[in-house]
């Protein structure tokens, strides 16, 4: 039975999933408590993920753009890197946003409790308070939004020169030679930052390509634009061991053309796993293990008044997915008819250039036996891209050969992450090449390339410079 003193909703975890759920539930009239063990709201994304990495990537992109301007007649002096000021800029960005969240919680009368929550039964939590002591919370409904934590390879030595993404974002120093373990989005974004600061980067990846999930033709294009950053890209290669020496980290690999090497800094970016181990989930009748928590499309766990959202429920581990699931869980807890039925969730690597993709890739469609038509628009034919020095970009649409509807898309080039939203909308709305191609896009813009790709699919020639 629901305890008499129960609060309507308690949310565990103040990341993008948790705070979005708490705010939506409060807006719907529920009394809400939000438990977060860290000092600020925002979770991984705001504190040690999306936002600090993008602050650094912005600086990296501006620096590289400024260097390129010499070819267009504008030269600056040699850039000086002041790590203290760069760290302060990054911290300022994070502080602005996390204090904004604290303010939004206050205006909505969401009670924020600083501590670590554990279940004691299906209607109670114990919170070990940050300042000492504990609090017992009775709840009608609960949303678990405890997120994820980085996977650490167990056989690596403890050494301050071996870091995860959080350690890399701290910018301990600019290494001469850096190894990134893992060729996924997080590893390659940090590689972009450190390479702009002056490091030479090697990447080791156990699979046969980088950026799993993107079509190989676009990966190849991206690689072509990023060659200058890297010493060696070792795909189909495993890291065997690291020995910490006074002169550096001595690394042995197992793979073709992957002789041993010595590095000043090693970043482990080999994935993230659900962070449920602190919650005592079994006390709430949920399975106690380190895997993702299963949920239905209302984000309910097998205990109907306990919901779970965000990284802790599975891939893709992305902030925009967590936010949408948070809204669904809050609306369900408030008794509204709702469900998580996103057709697609976009992925973006905010590298330089960016690469973004959504929906079915060409390879996935073919593997599933779906007949598709593929249209590519090279940015060399886009006036704006040429003017911006971005004529290496490409916009690709994957359309159903039967219906003409867009089923996927990908973009390589500056601002690809901003541009991909139009393709997401097209897929959600069931738009076809005519809808996109006959929509007048502003000229000259990079976004025009999506309209042009649709025109390519329609067999029409593009005649704008
Ligand atoms: P989290 O953000 O992980 O928040 C969970 C919160 O729960 C944490 O604050 C934690 O302290 C708290 N918590 C856990 N257990 C307890 C407990 N028992 N009691 C109290 N509190 C608890 N995603 C994107 O979409 N775009 C990006 O550009 C992007 N960049 C990234 C860059 C990096 C370097 C990293 C590491 C991740 C990035 N991500 C990005 C992923 C994104 O950060 C996550 O998908 C997102 O933060 C997940 O949100 P969440 O609410 O599920 O969990």
Image (tube, rainbow, N blue to C red):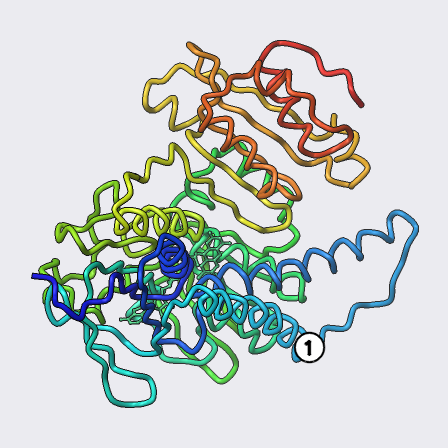
For residue 40, above or below residue 409? below
For residue 148, above or below residue 85? above
Q: Outermost residue toward the left?
A: 1
* Left or right: 412, with 211 as reference point: right
Q: Quadrant of residue 136?
A: bottom left
Which of these two is toward me, 189 or 121? 121
Give the image location of residue 97, x and y in percent: 55, 66
Does any portion of residue 267 appear in the rendered image? no
Does any portion of residue 335 appear in the rendered image? yes
For residue 400, above or below residue 413? above
Q: Quadrant of residue 224?
A: top right
Give the image location of residue 166, x and y in percent: 46, 70
Give the image location of residue 191, x and y in percent: 56, 59
Which of these two is toward me, 451 or 154? 451
Q: Which residue is mark 1?
A: 85
Residue drawn at x 46%, y 75% as measured from the top left: 249
Give the image location of residue 354, x and y in percent: 60, 45
Residue drawn at x 46%, y 25% as measured from the top left: 429
* Left or right: 74, with 94 as reference point: right
In which quadrant will I find the N terminus? bottom left
Which of these two is toward me, 66 or 258? 66
């Amino acid at each position: 039975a629901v305890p008499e003193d129960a609060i309507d909703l308690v949310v565990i975890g103040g990341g993008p999933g948790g705070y979005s759920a708490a705010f939506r539930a409060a807006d719907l009239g529920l009394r809400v408590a939000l438990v977060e063990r860290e000092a600020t709201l925002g979770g991984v994304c705001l504190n040690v993920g999306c936002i600090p990495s993008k602050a650094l990537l912005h600086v990296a992109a501006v620096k590289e753009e400024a260097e390129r301007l010499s070819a267009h007649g504008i030269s600056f002096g040699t850039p000086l890197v002041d790590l203290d000021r760069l760290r302060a800029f990054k911290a300022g960005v994070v502080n602005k946003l996390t204090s904004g969240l604290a303010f939004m919680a206050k205006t909505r009368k969401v009670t924020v409790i600083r501590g670590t929550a554990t279940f004691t039964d299906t209607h109670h939590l114990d919170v070990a308070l940050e300042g000492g002591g504990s609090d017992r919370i009775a709840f009608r409904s609960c949303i678990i939004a405890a997120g994820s934590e980085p996977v650490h390879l167990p056989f690596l030595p403890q050494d301050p020169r071996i870091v995860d993404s959080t350690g890399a974002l701290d910018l301990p120093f600019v290494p001469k030679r850096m190894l990134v373990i893992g060729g996924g989005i997080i590893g390659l974004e940090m590689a972009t930052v450190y390479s702009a600061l002056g490091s030479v980067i090697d990447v080791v990846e156990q699979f046969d390509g980088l950026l799993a999930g993107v079509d190989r033709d676009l990966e190849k294009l991206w690689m072509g634009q990023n060659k200058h950053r890297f010493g060696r890209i070792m795909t189909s290669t495993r890291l065997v061991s690291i020995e910490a020496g006074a002169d550096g980290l001595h690394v042995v690999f197992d793979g073709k053309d992957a002789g041993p090497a010595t590095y000043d800094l090693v970043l482990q970016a080999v994935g993230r796993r659900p962070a449920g181990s602190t919650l005592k989930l079994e006390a709430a009748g949920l399975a106690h293990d380190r895997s993702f928590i299963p949920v239905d499309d209302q984000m309910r766990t097998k205990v109907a008044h306990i919901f779970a959202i965000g990284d802790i429920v599975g891939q893709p581990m992305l902030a925009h997915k967590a936010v949408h699931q948070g809204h669904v869980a809050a609306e369900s807890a408030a008794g509204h008819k709702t469900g998580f039925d996103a057709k697609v969730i976009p992925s973006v690597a905010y590298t330089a250039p960016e690469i973004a993709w959504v929906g079915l890739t060409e390879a996935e469609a073919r593997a599933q036996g779906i007949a598709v038509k593929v249209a590519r628009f090279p940015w060399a034919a886009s006036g704006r891209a040429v003017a911006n020095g971005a004529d290496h970009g490409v916009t690709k649409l994957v359309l159903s050969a039967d219906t003409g509807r867009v089923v996927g898309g990908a973009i390589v080039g500056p601002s690809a992450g901003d541009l991909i939203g139009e393709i997401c909308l097209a897929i959600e709305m069931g738009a076809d090449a005519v809808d996109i191609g006959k929509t007048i896009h502003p000229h000259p813009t990079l976004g025009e390339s999506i309209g042009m790709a649709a025109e390519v699919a329609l067999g029409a020639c593009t005649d704008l410079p």
